[in-house]
Image (spheres, helix red, strand yellow):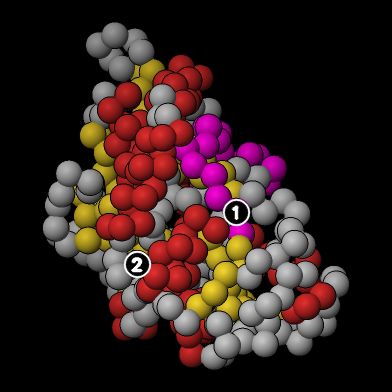
């Protein structure tokens, strides 16, 4: 998934990270909560010309990620339950390096903490625009991506993707009183105004519906909360949405309902993959994959359920 956001652009002192402050959580919709943090800074210690943030440990000759101590994890911190921002530290959070007094929580954060522990590092979040993550990774501004990002053939040309630590798919949601509430096929959605999130598969898959039915493929929303707000306000008839996140959405919005579709999107499966820069030492990739694979299916489900319960209301 990729995301694009427009917002006001203040300077953050001598900020050395590109980033932005977006809406915190899946149901917080105040437009005034948007902020963009711009800037560029030095590459990570040991960064190669290719942008890899891998460096050799001077003491033992082993490859390390970044400086080998602080694992800078790129994420939006605005995409609950994968990641979101809070103002207080807890056992579930990591500090957000480029936002004073802020912390990140969410499923990606829990996975990042497990990865950091396997690498012998301490994780911190770097809050940034989702669409900038791979560039920041290869520029050495972050060491790893844990941000609800799925591997794609195009992305594989720009980063090394590690194993998935959870898998999602795309569902569709409408209002209970919508004429489309009983839709089971793409053809049943004829005439519907459908919105997904900008620069993500949530927007791309709407083209598959348009191949079958005459639908209004709406200009995508910049954020997940903006997409949800469009349905809540009646601007859209149907939205595309994270299947794993639908139960919490329906709990929060009891007038929403998930469409029970017999037609399925092609290529909509969304693994949540960690990613490191091109040129990262294979031993580091292996360590990350071993850490991810050590998370059992039961543990993954428990982590997800806890994040769903803990995410912003």
Q: Name the residue under label 2.
A: 25
Image quarter of the C terminus:
bottom left
**Residue, x 42% and y 77% (percent of image)?**
253
Q: Can residue 124 be seen in this view?
A: yes
The range drawn in magenta is 153-170
The answer to whether 224 is drawn above or below residue 109 in the figure is below
**Residue, x 73% and y 70% (percent of image)?**
184
Query: Which residue lies most toward the right here?
Result: 212
The answer to whether 111 is drawn above or below residue 41 in the figure is above
In the image: residue 88, left or right of residue 243: left
C-alpha gap between disc 2 and disc 1: 19 Å
Of the residues under marks 2 and 1, which one precedes in the sequence? 2
The image position of residue 217, as x and y in percent, is 71, 79
In the image: residue 203, left or right of residue 284: right
Quadrant of residue 61 within the rendered picture: top left
Considering the numbered disc 2 on the image, is that residue within a helix, a strand or a loop?
Answer: loop
| Front: mark 2 or 1 | 1
**Residue, x 28% and y 28% (percent of image)?**
117
């Amino acid at each position: 998934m990729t995301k694009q956001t427009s917002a006001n652009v203040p300077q953050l002192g001598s900020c050395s990270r590109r980033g932005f402050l977006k809406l915190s959580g899946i149901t917080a919709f105040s437009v005034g909560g948007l902020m963009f943090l711009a800037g560029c800074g030095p590459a990570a210690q040991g960064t190669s010309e290719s942008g890899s943030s891998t460096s050799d440990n001077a003491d033992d000759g082993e490859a390390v990620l970044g400086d080998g101590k602080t694992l800078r994890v790129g994420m939006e911190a605005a995409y609950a339950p994968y990641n979101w921002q809070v103002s207080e530290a807890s056992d579930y959070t990591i500090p957000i390096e480029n936002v004073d007094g802020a912390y990140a929580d969410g499923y990606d954060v829990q996975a990042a903490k497990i990865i950091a522990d396997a690498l012998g590092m301490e994780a911190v979040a770097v809050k940034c625009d989702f669409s900038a993550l791979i560039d920041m990774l290869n520029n050495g501004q972050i060491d790893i991506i844990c941000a609800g990002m799925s591997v794609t053939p195009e992305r594989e040309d720009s980063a090394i993707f590690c194993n998935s630590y959870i898998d999602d798919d795309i569902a569709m949601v409408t209002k209970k009183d919508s004429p489309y509430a009983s839709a089971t096929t793409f053809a049943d959605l004829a005439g519907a105004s459908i919105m997904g999130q900008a620069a993500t598969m949530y927007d791309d898959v709407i083209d598959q519906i348009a191949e079958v039915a005459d639908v209004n493929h709406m200009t995508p929303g910049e954020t997940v909360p903006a997409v949800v707000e469009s349905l809540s306000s009646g601007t859209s008839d149907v939205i595309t949405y994270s299947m794993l996140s639908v139960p919490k959405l329906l709990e929060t919005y009891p007038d929403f309902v998930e469409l029970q579709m017999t037609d399925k999107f092609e290529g909509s499966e969304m693994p949540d993959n960690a990613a490191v820069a091109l040129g990262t030492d294979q031993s580091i990739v292996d360590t990350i994959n071993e850490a991810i694979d050590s998370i059992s299916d039961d543990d993954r489900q428990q982590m997800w359920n806890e994040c769903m319960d803990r995410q912003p209301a």
